[in-house]
Image: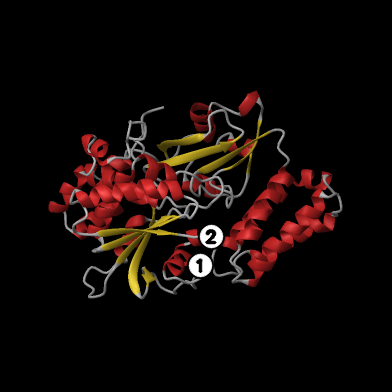
Amino acid sequence: MRDCKIVSRKFELENSHTLEVAKANNGYASLAKMDEYSPTDMIQIIKDANLRGKGGGGASAGDKWELMPQDSDKASFLAVNCDESEPGTFKDRQIISKDPHLLIEGIILTCYSVKVKHAYIYIRGEYFQFQHILQAAIDEAYADGLLDECDITIHRGAGAYICGEKSALLESMEGKRGHPRLKPKQKEPEWYFGNPTLVNNVETIASVPFIIQNGSDAYREFGTEKSPGTLLFAMSGHIEKPGVYEYEFGVSMMEYINYFGGGIKNGKKLKAVIPGGVSCGVLTARECENLTLDYEALRSIGSSLGTGGMIIMDEDTDMVEVLKNILEFYHEESCGQCTPCREGTGWSDKIVAKILDKKGTKADIDKLLDLADVMNGKTICVFAPSVSTVLVSFIEKFRDEFEEAL
């Protein structure tokens, strides 16, 4: 398998988090391109590269950048999403702990492109130690004069999963409850205190320096036509070598699992994979056999690539227990704003608990599917539809285990 390191190139270097090591390894070299390209030129380069958001949705980053006003009298802002509360996902913390200066470099380029003077990094509340590493890097950048044209502020969240949703993130930054906002009818930027704001994931921003430095064609040499570039895929669960490994989109899932992860732990057989964090539909071992890791392939079988957080499960895994674990999380983390989500997550959690207690009936399994239908597409954000996807995929693919547990 060929070398595909774009974001993780400096991860293995000693003291890779320092400015000295970053600069000794071509860090901040891409900033010279700001003398060569206009802001609109840079946006076009990002569009030509088809950089897709790496926080879960996979939307075009360049299209989002283009929504930001280039000639407004109002201040504009950048919000970098480092909430990373999705179970099974732990890639962004690798960037902020191993190469925070790459993120800062990407922020500087992005701010120049969308004419922003102040960027915020919204970081998960539990990432306390990583916040200190990131703040030290920001302080180094200030001392070196790298942040003369834009300011960077870390905004620490309070550990709410829903604040990974971009509008809830901004509500939290404004000092309010992290409740998602109603979506506008037309395409427009996000708004922070009434000012146009761009929200992008950490890895998305960290990919920008390579693209600006080497050009869109260099980025498109990796991956597929519709999913170009690379992703930091994270593996956890029943795998010999859990961790974060960068590779290009379009790689065979099983080849990736066996090459980087060393195969299933203790030589057991693969039973199931959650491909991109727990909000993605579960896949059976058979579905994984000829599957590639890219947005289109995962969507075609009713799941999604999400953040690339793969949870590997071996042949001895109790899928009813796994679903109960996931539903407990969703029950706890629902913000409660929408009734189908608030009630549906709690109700489904209790029904699965009833099944595990050997008190369930077949009617309870059907009731879970009814709840999934009620939660899908009837709420402000995608939290409840994600729970719906999880419920349906587990029950449809492993219904025999649910019936055996009755």
Q: Residue at x 22, y 39 (%)?
A: 23
Check disc 1 and report its element: helix, strand or loop.
loop
User: In the drawing, does residue 378 fall left or right of residue 187?
Assistant: right
Q: Residue at x 32, y 47 (%)?
A: 136
Q: Nearer the viewer, residue 379 or 130?
A: 130
User: In the drawing, does residue 115 fall left or right of residue 125?
Assistant: left
Residue 286 lies, in percent from the top left, at: 64, 36
- Please give the residue where the numbered disc 1 appears in the rendered image: 178
Res. 134 in view: yes
Q: CA distance from mark 1 to mark 2?
A: 8 Å
Q: Which quarter of the figure has residue 121? A: bottom left
Q: Which quarter of the figure has residue 6? A: top left
Q: Which mark is residue 312?
A: none
Residue 397 lies, in percent from the top left, at: 70, 45
Q: Residue at x 78, y 44 (%)?
A: 400
Q: Which mark is residue 160?
A: 2
Q: How many marks?
A: 2
Along the polypeptide, which appears first: circle 1 or circle 2? 2
Q: Residue furthest left?
A: 35
Check disc 2 and report its element: helix, strand or loop.
loop
Characterize the local packing of mark 1: few (<14), some (14-19) or many (20 or more) Cα atoms within 10 angstroms: many
Please, what is the three-letter code of the amino acid marked with disc 1? Gly
Res. 44 in view: no
User: In the drawing, does residue 313 fall left or right of residue 382?
Assistant: right
Residue 306 lies, in percent from the top left, at: 50, 50
Residue 267 lies, in percent from the top left, at: 64, 23
Please, what is the three-letter code of the amino acid marked with disc 2? Ala
For the residues bearing labels 1 and 2, Cβ distance under 8 angstroms:
yes
Characterize the local packing of mark 2: few (<14), some (14-19) or many (20 or more) Cα atoms within 10 angstroms: many
Residue 169 higher or lower than 309, as above or below: below
Q: Nearer the viewer, residue 149 or 293?
A: 149
Q: Residue at x 21, y 50 (%)?
A: 143
